[in-house]
Amino acid sequence: MKQTNISVFVPHTGCPHRCTFCDQRTISGEVKAPTADEVRSLLREQVPVLREHDTRAEIAFFGGSFTGIAHGYMVSLLEAAHEAVMAHPDVYCGIRCSTRPDFIDEETLDVLCSYGMTAVELGAQSMNDNVLRLNERGHTAHDVETAAAMIKQRELSLGLQMMTGLYGDKPEYCVQTAERFIALGADTVRIYPTVILAGTRLGELYESGEYRTFTFGETVELCAGLLRMFDKAHIPVIRLGLHASKDVEAKMLGGVYHPALREIVESRVFYEEMLEEMKRLGGHRFTVYTDPTNISKIVGQRKENKEKLNANGFDFVIKTEQGTRLRIENAL
Ligand code: SF4
């Protein structure tokens, strides 16, 4: 059976912060916060659709700082979600939310758990305190560690979200952030390369020339390394890059945004792994075995991987092998 999220966007409501990168209404693509009855209707409507597609769903409150919204409103949304889980356990298998690390405490977790919350994602963004300060996050890396420990203690699934290329950021800080996420026992991770939006503090800094983010190439290389780190730690990266959105495209001044970003980064991972393995095996001609679903990523966009490996003195043919991710042998 497949699994998905039914996302309910709760935009910016209750957030007293103005992080340098955030224009919450643009990112969520919504202006109005949904009522509990609207959530009930949405969840009811989705039941036959999910059944038809043999899919179970988690109800996901995303978009802002869920535990920072008005308490009564948060509880009303939780009630609506909890009712749906109780009424349709064959379809709805849990509730998740995203929030700020400093909006988590034991009382809040008591409330979330009483309505059957299964996963909490923290917008950590960076584990470098200077990057957090420069981007006016209003919390520290220590706050992330404290909140993460509380979430793990409740045996909730811990999601950690990071950004790359913020004001003051460096690739090595992102790698250190990933190392800290792994040490904290993240169950899932999301990676968001910075997109610079008009109307934000980052937008001003960018236009004044005071800030540049990582280039597209730097981001692909960095994110490939991050994917490999999380993969080695068996932590699924459940999102890489912002969802495609006309609102974001219309307000974007700079940064890294590409509808196929994940595919491009995964292709880079294949390139790095093939290069390492071919060097290890020695020789110049190889057979690469892989599942048919990986072929485009192995070859690379516009055959980029093949050409780069050729430039390193390596050539290969691909043979399909169901279920194999990557296996390389010297060609006879
Ligand atoms: S805390 Fe979240 S919602 Fe609030 S300004 Fe920062 S990024 Fe936006």
Image (cartoon, rainbow, N blue to C red):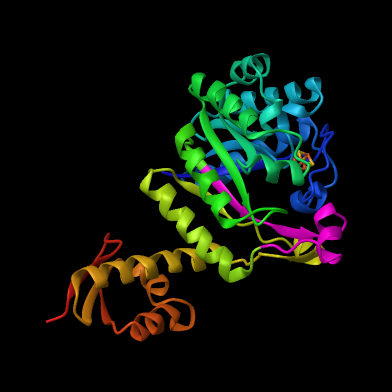
Question: Which one is nearer the viewer's eye here, 260 or 19?
Answer: 19
Eyeballing the image, is 133 above or below 328?
Answer: above
Q: Where ligand 1 lies, by quadrant?
A: top right
Eyeballing the image, is 208 above or below 312?
Answer: above
Magenta span has 186?
Answer: no
Classify the position of the N terminus by image quarter: top left
Say whether residue 137 is left or right of residue 170. Answer: right
Q: In this view of the protein, can residue 217 be seen by the observer?
A: yes
The picture places residue 32, in percent across and down from the top left corner, at 85, 42
Q: Which residues are magenta?
A: 189-213
Say whether residue 101 is left or right of residue 199. Answer: left
State the residue at coordinates (68%, 33%). 140
Question: Which one is nearer the viewer's eye here, 27 or 6?
Answer: 27
Eyeballing the image, is 50 above or below 99?
Answer: below
Magenta span has 194?
Answer: yes
How many numbered discs sit on the rendered protein?
0
The picture places residue 41, in percent across and down from the top left corner, at 72, 36
The quarter of the displayed image where residue 295 is located? bottom left
The picture places residue 183, in percent across and down from the top left corner, at 45, 35
Question: Which one is nearer the viewer's eye here, 317 or 309?
Answer: 309
The picture places residue 231, in percent across and down from the top left corner, at 40, 49
State the residue at coordinates (51%, 50%). 175
Classify the position of the C terminus by image quarter: bottom left
Q: In this view of the protein, can residue 320 be seen by the observer?
A: no
The quarter of the displayed image where residue 329 is located? bottom left
The quarter of the displayed image where residue 282 is located? bottom left
Eyeballing the image, is 209 above or below 310?
Answer: above
Say whether residue 2 is left or right of residue 133. Answer: left
